[in-house]
Amino acid sequence: MTSDKLTQFAKRYAEAWCSHNPERVAAFFGENGSLKVNDKAPAIGRAAIAKEAQAFMTTFPDMIVTFDKLEPCGDATAFHWILTGTNPGPGGIGKHVRISGFELWKIDNNGLVAESRGHFDAAEYDRQLKHGVEPL
């Protein structure tokens, strides 16, 4: 995939997260693609990926995911993002969150994500869930 096509793919992927439609996120993955978030077990297959996306969408009903940049990383590409939102549910206390991270993507022959290994600062995320940050 050319860098221009990959950039457009990344922008559409961020928009899918903002759509609050978890199936739109899952559609960016191959049928047997995987999404791993930090140290959690990977979600394998589109249904499991949609379930993972739904968890974030439920936690942050006003979630915005912004595409930051792409970065080559060996045989993969790092998709850098920024998530902003408010966590009113479930168990949330309505604090504002602004966290950045990246997904290390391996793209399959069909131009879809075969494997994504996501990373963000879990300690900072937990701190923000409890104490929040100033809204943007």
Image: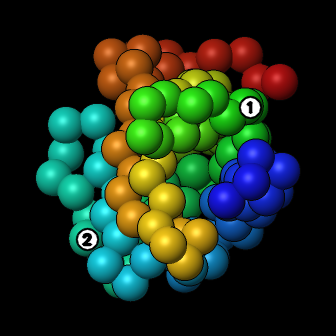
Label 1: how many residues lie within 10 Å, few (<14), some (14-19) or many (20+)? Answer: some
Residue, x 44% and y 77% (percent of image)? 30
- Amino acid at circle 2: Ile
Placement of 41 over or under 31, stated as above or below: above
**Pick the front one: 61 or 81:** 81
User: Dividing the image into 4 quarters, which one contains the C terminus?
Assistant: top right
Residue, x 57% and y 51% (percent of image)? 60
**Pick the front one: 87 or 1:** 1
Kindly indicate the quadrant of the structure image that contains residue 52: bottom left
Kindly indicate the quadrant of the structure image that contains residue 68: top right
Label 2: how many residues lie within 10 Å, few (<14), some (14-19) or many (20+)? Answer: some
Give the structural element (helix, strand or loop) at label 2. Answer: strand
Residue 130 shows in the view: no
Kindly indicate the quadrant of the structure image that contains residue 99: top right
Residue marked by disc 2: 44
Rendering coords of residue 33 (x, y %): 35, 70
**Pick the front one: 48 or 88:** 48
Residue marked by disc 1: 68
Rendering coords of residue 53 (x, y %): 47, 63
Rendering coords of residue 39 (x, y %): 19, 37
Q: Earlier in the sequence, mark 2 or mark 1?
A: 2
Residue, x 25% and y 71% (percent of image)? 44
